[in-house]
Image (cartoon, rainbow, N blue to C red):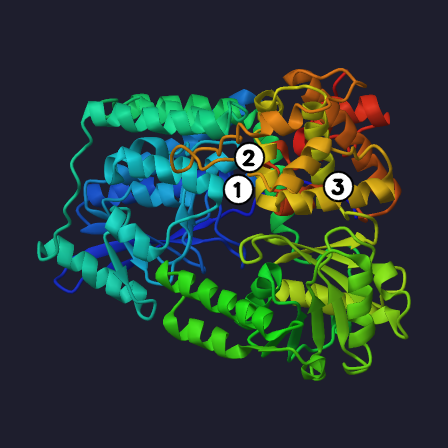
Amino acid sequence: MPFAAQRPERVTRADVRDVPLPDGGILALVVLDPGSEQPTTFGPQGIAALADTFRHLHERVGAGELTAVAVTGGSAVFAAGADLTQVAAVTDRADALALARAGHAAYGLLADLDVPTFAFVNGAALGGGLELALHCDHRTVAADVRALGLPETSLGLVPGWGGCHLLPRLVGVEAALDVILTRAAANAPLSAGQAVPLGLADTVLDRDGFLDASVRWAAGVLRGEVTVTRRPLDAPGDWRAAVDVARAHLDATVHGARLAPYRALELVAAGPDVPRAEAYAAEDEALADLVMSDEMRASVYAFGLVQGAKRPAGAPDGDQARPVTRVGVVGAGLMAAQIATLAARRLAVPVVMRDLDQTRVTAGLTAVRSGVQRLVAAGRMTAAEADRIVAAVSGTTDLADLAGCDLVVEAVTEILDLKKRVFAELEPVVGPTAVLATNTSALSVGAMAAALEHPERVVGLHFFNPVASMPLVEVAHAAHTSPQALATAVAVAGNLGKTPVLVADRPGFVVNRLLVLLLGLVLEAVDQGTPVEVADAALDPLGLPMRPFALLDLVGPAVGQHVLTSLRADLGERFPRSPGLERVVAEGLAVTLPPPARGLPRPVDPALHRVFGVGRDGGRRAPNGPALLDRVLTALTTEVGLLLDEGVVPDVRQIDLCMLLGAGWGGHLGGICPYLDRTGYSARVLGHRLLPDGVANVPTVA
């Protein structure tokens, strides 16, 4: 697959139409028209056009022609912010600074109009789109809007068109930092219902007739019948305290590995008394610096990968997918219950879970019920939807009850002989076109199906825990897997709301092969004598979402040991054995302790010092933190090269996509391959770069 070339800017127009107000007067409505079905974005030409529109409105206001001005979206979104492809194409800091200043100048023209201004937020408003709305006096929002936020720090940038200055003054500094830092990192924008209590929007209006209702609401404001109360500005001491808490959280989670969130925090930390012009000048400088950074280039590369991954590379034609009207799940444990819940929710088909005895079946159904009840309690699901899901999922101990299923997913213990037996028992029960899928994370799909009469119907569907929230599904195809089975698996993964990536039937596929290698090397270092805390913190310069021992705790020590042992058996001694981990599993020890405060990392359990201190490996010298980081990155580079040599994925970018979506590998790194290129590991270990020159703008390291 060729790497995409830079596309020309899609210039967003700012069309103006006059709307008569009920009591007389004219509201000039600026409609942002992207000129296509793509989301509204602003590049240099779009910003210039917007500025021209606002200058003309200044003239009309000065002539007494207008009573008010409003801005709304002309497509399904309000505005999605800056055109990242245009931003990433900037190669000169002076051009980056000019783009930052142009955005401030255009938006400032809106803010400085001498009539009341309104944003009628009809759809998603993200980044520069939300900042445009912040420059208005008032904001209405449609009830079904689910994406209001400032995601810039997750893209290696800062909210650089007024967001760092305006948002804390509107909603308070603590809430603003949550939006700018925490929600951006978690990809958790606000909904319309959350925006009004926060003060980000003034009122929520129904989708039907939204524009007319917004005009009526604005008329009420102009008449004085509708008043909006703003929260008082935070006192300087409270402002500093909120900034200090946010900085402590960044230090504990990001460890200084990313520039963007710290620059955003510095901008907010300037305090409540900084004048707008001074604040905007600081945003300009920060944005110009970050546009030229590796972090921004890698982040935009990662963003493009994720956004463009709707159809997996190498997938057969979707027309070959078979319809799925009933799903079976073999097993009723944690993963099985999560898969059953997701299938019932997203596919809206009956799902039947089968296990060996009624006790296990009952436990699985209870897990389904408890899971949806938690979503209802959190306001993320209606009670009616929960009732529908619970009713759709049934349980049985009789294998014959799976006979009418079009797709059966086995989710039993990771033991090859057990999985082979499950498929052997299933094959004569299900129909001739039914697809049999395994949720294995590391075992051979081909070996599971080898003894079947029709091995071509078997495919891998590797979900990640927790199933509901992890976006990746590795779709594993063996040599025998038919195009129909593969197309069905890809279609099902997409319909479940996941991003499918095709992987060949090799041990560990992509994510577990790399992550378990990483974990194994960290554990090996501790076995050799590296202090637990030193080894756990050694990878902090990468800015990964969690430290190795927290990851091991999430996976489960027994599962981690099993997969590490399995990969060692299949791939060799580069996947190390860990006597310490074996003792952790044997003694049932905890790996981490509860975090000291919400949002802070979980500390390593001191008991690990005892089990890892027994019989230290007398071979390789215990590495310190930097040496361990080098050891891990060298090994990962080698493994990435082997993944490509073995054809596990059809394209190097699929490795990055897997690590971004299945391992939470930082977007600021671009996944893993841009980082290995940028730091010189790929050239040193493999003798060549992994990505073509110019992709992610990664410079060659001598």
Q: How crowded is mark 1: few (under 14 residues within 10 Å), some or many (20 or more)?
A: some
Query: In the rendered image of this protein, does residue 442 appear above or below residue 595?
Result: below
Is label 2 in a helix, a strand or a loop?
helix
Give residue 89's quadrant in the image: top right
Distance Cα–Cα, label 1 vs label 2: 6 Å
Q: What element carries label 1?
A: loop
Residue 548 in the figure: left or right of residue 276: right
SS for tag 3?
helix
Which residue corresponds to the image point at 55% horizontal and 47% vertical from the top-left? 10
Q: Name the residue under label 1.
A: 83
Q: Say which of 384 and 291 sits in front.
A: 384
Residue at 42%, 61% (x, y): give it: 375
Residue closest to the eye, 451 or 446: 451
Q: 427 or 286, which is in the foreground?
A: 427
| Amino acid residing under circle 1 | Asp
Tag 3: residue type? Answer: Leu
Circle count:
3
Answer with left or right where residue 140 lies relative to residue 595.
left
Residue highlighted by disc 2: 87
Is residue 321 visible in the rendered image? The answer is yes
Residue 367 coordinates in the image, percent (x, y): 51, 65
Name which of mark 3 and mark 2 comes first in the sequence: 2
Dot 3 corresponds to which residue? 564
Inter-mark Cα distance, 3 to 2: 42 Å
Q: Residue at x 79, y 36 (%)?
A: 640
Residue type marked 2:
Val
Q: Is label 3 in contact with label 1 (beta carbons under 8 Å)? A: no
Q: Earlier in the sequence, mark 3 or mark 1?
A: 1
